[in-house]
């Protein structure tokens, strides 16, 4: 089961998230989402737990839990919504340029 974790402190990394959720059961993956350009945490992440009962127990245990001074928001992750086609191509210039006739 995939679990959304929000309210993560900027000082918390993926290993810290994995360690916390390992207290509730087996964790196959834990990722704090980072800005692709700065590498700074975006303040949320995802934890993957293969056992649904352990995942539900982790949600109950850690929702509202204080980690590094921040209260976590923990719930079952919703499926990612498809983003609409990215912005269109913009209108470039059409036709040739006009040169000098002489």
Image: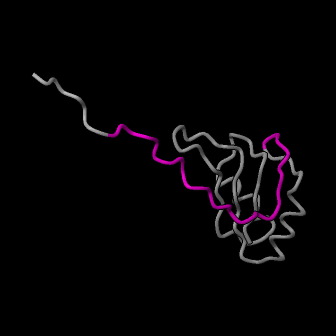
Quadrant into which the C terminus falls: top left
Q: Where's residue 32, x and y in %?
A: 65, 52
- Residue 97: image quadrant is top left
Check the image and report above or below for 39 versus 79: above
In-image side of 87 versus 65 (left or right): left
Q: Magenta residues?
A: 68-94
From the viewer's side, name the closer residue of 68 and 44. 44
Quadrant into which the N terminus falls: bottom right
Give the main secondary structure, helix, strand or loop, of the magenta stretch: loop
Check the image and report above or below for 101 versus 2: above
In-image side of 7 versus 32 (left or right): right
* Residue displayed at 76% across by 78% down: 51
From the viewer's side, name the closer residue of 19 and 92. 92
* Residue displayed at 90% across by 63% down: 60
Q: Where's residue 93, x and y in %?
A: 36, 37
- Residue 54: image quadrant is bottom right
Q: Where's residue 73, x and y in %?
A: 83, 52
**What colour-coding does the image apply?**
one colour
* Residue displayed at 75% across by 64% down: 78
In-image side of 90 versus 49 (left or right): left
From the viewer's side, name the closer residue of 83 and 30. 83
In the displayed orientation, state which residue is furthest to the left.
Answer: 102
Residue 79 lies within the magenta run: yes
* Residue displayed at 80% across by 76% down: 52
């Amino acid at each position: 089961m995939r679990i959304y974790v929000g309210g993560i402190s900027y000082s918390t990394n993926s290993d810290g998230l994995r360690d916390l959720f390992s207290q509730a059961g087996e964790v196959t993956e834990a990722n704090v989402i980072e800005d692709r350009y700065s590498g700074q945490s975006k303040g949320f992440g995802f934890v993957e737990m293969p056992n649904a009962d352990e995942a539900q127990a982790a949600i109950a245990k850690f929702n509202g839990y204080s980690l590094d001074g921040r209260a976590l928001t923990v719930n079952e992750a919703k499926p990612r919504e498809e983003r609409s086609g990215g912005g269109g191509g913009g209108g470039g210039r059409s036709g040739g340029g006009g040169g000098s006739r002489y």
